[in-house]
Image: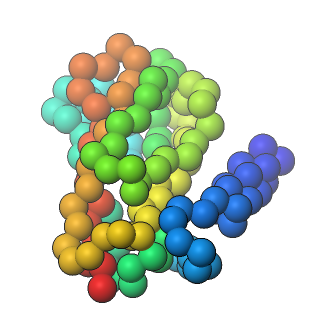
Amino acid sequence: MARFWLWATMLATVTLCGCGGNSPQKTTRIADREITLSEEAFEAGISDTLQLGRMRQGEIIAKTIRLHNGCDRPVVILREATSCGCTTAQYLRQPIAPASSCDITIEFNSQGQLGWQMKLMEFYFAEKATPLKIYIDAEVE
């Protein structure tokens, strides 16, 4: 039931938020991806690249990443940081229990962007020295 409300809230947010201009924006959903969080991965540093491909200026692409906790203790996302206001993240603000997962929906809004885009989103965790780095790669026409 909680997952239903999460998706309903995200859909309402995407539908109701206008980010510049009066023209309606189209949101495209991209297939899910899973990242396993483990002590070894945190020590080595975790990074991934979301290849969004070609998109039209003004289009919003959303991609869901599932974080799976492979640690023996709960993992807590403290905060996220972005290199640009055109990227946002939505997720439940609660600890991820061992062997459980958390979905993070990352959105890239191409309004005002043109050409090749490489954005960075970092997720900082409690008691972990290195953040999870997600690079967003897109070509805006």
Q: Nearer the viewer, residue 67 or 91?
A: 91
Q: Nearer the viewer, residue 118 or 45?
A: 118
Vertical comparison of 32 with 84: above or below: below
Q: Dividing the picture into quarters, in which one does residue 115 lie?
A: bottom left
Image quarter where the C terminus lies is bottom left
Q: For the point 26% across and 76% down, which residue is it?
A: 114
Q: For the point 16% across and 33% down, which residue is it?
A: 44
Q: Is residue 130 left or right of residue 109?
A: left
Give the farthest residue toward the left. Answer: 44
Could you tell me residue 77's position as x and y percent?
46, 28
Could you tell me residue 48's position as x and y percent?
26, 53
Q: From this viewpoint, is residue 75 visible?
A: no
Give the farthest residue toward the right. Answer: 1
Could you tell me residue 118's position as x and y percent?
21, 61
Q: For the point 61% across and 27% down, which residue is it?
A: 94
Give the farthest residue toward the top. Answer: 127
Q: From this viewpoint, is residue 27 visible?
A: yes
Q: Dividing the picture into quarters, in which one does residue 27 lie?
A: bottom right
